[in-house]
Amino acid sequence: MQKKKQVNDLFVKNGMDVPFFLIMLVLMTIGLVMLLSASYIYAFHYSGSGDSLYYFKRQIVFAVLGIIGMLVYSRLNYKYLKMITNIGLLGALVILAITVLRGGGDGINRWFGIGAFSFQPSEMAKFMLILFCAAGLDKNHKKIISAEPSKAQWAQKITELSKGSIKITRGTTTMFFYALVIGFTAGMVLLGSHLSGAILILLIGVAMLWIGECRARWFAVLGMVVAVVLVYVMFNYEDLPLKEYMIVRIKAWRIKDFSPDDARWQINHSLYALGSGGFLGAGIGNSKQKYLYVSESHTDFIFSIIGEELGFVGCFIILAIFICLILRGIYIGMRAKDRYGALLVFGMTSQLALQVMFNVAVVTDTVPNTGISLPFFSYGGSALLITLVEMGTILAVSRQADLPKVYSIRKSRKESK
Amino acid sequence: MSRVNSNLKKRCASAIAFILVFGFGLDICRLFYFQVIKADEYRTEAEAQQLSDTVVSADRGVIYDANMNVLAESASAWLVYVNPSKIKDEAQKNLVATGLSKILGDVTAETIAEKISNKEYSYVKIKSRIEYNAKTAISEFVKENELYEVIGLDPDTKRYYPFGNFASTVIGMTNSDNNGRAGLELKYNDTLTGVPGRIITAKDANSGLMSSNYETKFDAEQGTSLVLTIDKSVQYYLEKGLSQAVKDNKAASAYGIVMEVDTGAVLAMATMPDYNLNEPSVLTDKAILAELSKIKDEDEYDVAYNNAVYLMWRNRAISDTYEPGSVFKIFTAAAGLEEGVVSSSSTYNCTGSIRVAENIINCHKHSGHGTQTFTQGLMNSCNPFFITIGQELGTDRFYKYFEAFGFTETTGIDLPAEAEPAADITYHSKDKMGIAQLSSSAFGQTFQVSAVQMITAVSAVANGGRLMQPYVVAKKLDQDGNTVYETTPTVKRQVISENTSETVIGMMEMVVAEGTGKNAYIPGYRVAGKTGTSEKLTVDGQYIASFVGCAPADDPKIAVLIIIDEPQGASHGGGAIAAPVAGSVIEQTLKYMNVEPVYTDDELSKINAVTPDVTNVSVSAAKNTLSTEGFTARVVGKGDKVITQYPIKGQSIPMGGVVVLYTEPNVKDTTSVVPNLTGLSISEANARAVNAGYNIKVSGAALDSEVVSYRQSVAEGTKAELGSTITVYFKTTTGVQDD
């Protein structure tokens, strides 16, 4: 009874998963140190303040406040998140729409400002979409895995028209509903000229649908369609109705010595930085490429500076720590109290994994250059806060998960009780 | 207690596995590819952009004369560059262009503006080798207008020639890139050029500096220095003589060489007119400038100007060839003596002409020299005599010596652009040397030699028969002054025997003592020599007068060759105009080399004496003392005691010279007007000078009774202090005709 009461409270007093928190702290610490190293030259020249520590100072404030906020937030009983799911996603879409309408030009409509605080609405949309999918896929789990014919009129009509050869199940209609929401959200982000954000949202959505146990055959079909589209785009990007900058970036990725307006400047210097680092790296603080060669060296391209200073070994270790965090997240998800908690954690974790994967893929010229930040490393207050909210959500789930008590902070207190 | 079903777990595990394996796996592979496999390639690319490699020019080696006087050295200079990528706007560009143009002077603002208009460049050199003043002015300009990022100065070096025109055609100069362009600077460019240093600095993407932590410095290494065989004093005597000769004879040019006969070391080499090594592209010759000013077309003028500049740089002593004329008789004589076809006492009867095959060749003395000994033949420079000797030698033997004396090859002197002898063009090859060619060659005509070939061959005659390889660089020094190379004289071959050498020098001494070379006679020194005059083959009615001499005749140390090209004066003969120059160079050089003069009694009577102290004695006593010591007294004032005298005691003036005795203090005017002392014999000139209250110093062929003065050091009509010494130059006009 005592326990049940606790769970029903708005806040949970159970201990969180300490390993996950510690791994995250390690990443944040390394991230801050590397941000300092990667940003001080740029800060000195371009922050406008002449203060080499400009970005570092701001980031550390966000980090400290963010962690405190995250710890408080993680005490939230995550079932109450369901209450803000619909309104949250709607709000995110409205903000996206406002941003798109207000913007107009390329690039500048990615940000939404409230007073002095500005953030990328796509970040918020990502988070809200995960909440929405997690809640919906949990609630409608039975429908999704159902093989019964759909009760929807349009579905029945199709079955009728096809004389029964096409049978649309409830699972299919449900999935399409979520797919539609995901697609719409991604579309809104894409309208905001944020291709990478849109792709990320699509991928997170697909991951959510997959985890939500939609039928595997759809993913096989999707996989084939995506592959065909990708190959088509790779060879016909110049004829597609894409925005000019997108074509240029794809072209710069496809043609390695293509250089109108130095389209490959950033990526080439990123590769120079990685090569300069070599196996063991130039040593922390010793990057030369950060001397204004690698643009955005403190944000999206911070990993190339890490590569130069810490070498392949350092990159590998950092990616390994990320993997540890991801695996620990999965572990928490698998031991979550309920399906909703598990879906939340899996969504957040795969979001993080995809973002890290994509960021490094951009830096290594594996995919066309697109703006994806590296969680815990890239400068950016709002991005860091969103990341910490996501981590906080995982921690919130962990507080109610069935985890070995040995990791719990509350262990001693509980024993003493 | 998990409520998460196994399907969810499977889906989740597969999704994460997919991301980790394909996503992270691919990332790690790509990182490995760029950071390990392709690391060097990309690092090189990165460094190519990050590193700015500044070359620090090395100081060129110093060029010293034989006594370590600096003839050429490098000093600090600067080069100014502009970083166009930092220029804000058109106004700033114009400011930079006009500002720099004003300071630099010789670069127009338009040129600079044009150069710096491409904003993609970050380093555009405007001018190198800027001197300190301009550098300071630029720094000021940069400061005033805050152009710190736009205009920069880099260290550079500049070549300085402390003596300007001195030995210009030998030393040569460098171009704006500090590379040798002519003369020794060109020949020894690799030696003189040091190893440039480098400063490798890391720069950021905006060409700003990263920090000095990334700076690597390689110090510049100074080039090797040269110590020449050229002696500043001897060079000075030669240059002074040649430039006077050009002036006196209104000649196109005059050039000459002084060589140490035993080693082939060049003590002096000069071409007049010369040029200022510090401003090598500026024409100074007024005659040429006047000629050029007639050209109206600008392009044509530029071409003509440049050609004139190149001509001015020409080291004629090395690069020009000329018909040696009678000077060559030395070698015909040597060959004849060596081969025994003639001896110094052989006689020949010159009738004034000789028949060679179909042609009659006249002697320059149309009446003929009559019967003469071989020595007299050389003294008279008798053509038929030498034709006969040539014919007696025959082509084979004549050619053998022609070749042995080095007239068919370059001397190999370490100077650039030595004239290359060409068979059947500059000389007759053995195969094509018929009787006519043999005969004309025997007295020095129908072929050409260079001055350096000539003096090297004469040195061989003088040094006992060894043909040396002439050289200008005696030593090479590293930057700490250690000798890293020393030239050892190279004997090319023995051409004639010691005996023949002595005999020929003896005969040549007679040429100077009593023959056509009289004007090279120097009291106290035994000079051997031979005159030559030849008509120029390229220009009608123009002559080349030459004289070659060596001294002392009993043990020759130096050989001097003087060539006067296109003299326009009353006389164009080598004996008349080249011999006096050679004589004066030999005299000064021997004195400088501390060769003690040995005077004959005859000479002694004409040499100088030292003035005694006759102050503070009575006028009569002073007069007495002076007359007993062979001087003349001239009294100024009415006092009876000598207060001061001029010249003061201990001065060297000619015997019979005047000493002015002042008997009153504060004599207002102690000067008088210098009389004309030219066109006189020595005694006449002395008498006239003493009469006017001056002393003369005799210069030139002092022994000959037939000498006539032709120049005086203080011009007629000018005021000069009583008792001062005027140098009067004498030469003989008779018996020096040699063609």
Image (spheres, coloured by chain):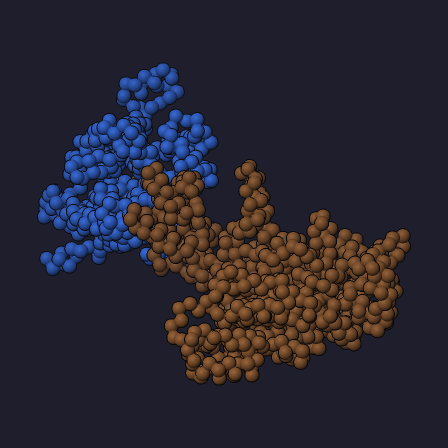
Chain colours: A blue, B brown
From where the camera sits, is residue B474 visible? no
Q: Name the quadrant of the C terminus of chain B.
A: bottom right
B210 shown above or below B597: above
Q: Position of residue B466 (x, y in %)?
A: 73, 72
Q: Seen in the image, is B237 located left or right of residue B92?
A: right
Question: Which residue is depicted at the point 79% across and 53% down?
Answer: B424
From where the camera sits, is residue B144 visible? yes
Residue furthest toward the front?
B638
Q: Seen in the image, is B303 located left or right of residue B359?
A: left
Question: Which residue is depicted at the point 77% across and 70% down?
Answer: B495
Compare residues A46 and B7 and report the one nearer the observer: A46
B531 shown above or below A245: below
Question: Which residue is depicted at the point 20% across and 38% down?
Answer: A118
Residue furthest toward the right?
B357
A169 shown above or below A204: above
Compare residues B175 and B259 and report the one nearer the observer: B259
Q: How many marks?
A: 0
Q: Position of residue B472 (x, y in %)?
A: 61, 66
Compare residues B676 and B162 and report the one nearer the observer: B676
Q: Position of residue A365 (x, y in %)?
A: 41, 43
Question: Which residue is depicted at the point 17% across and 36% down?
Answer: A114
Q: Position of residue A315 (x, y in %)?
A: 36, 52
Q: Seen in the image, is B345 located left or right of residue A215?
A: right
Give the image quarter of residue A19: bottom left
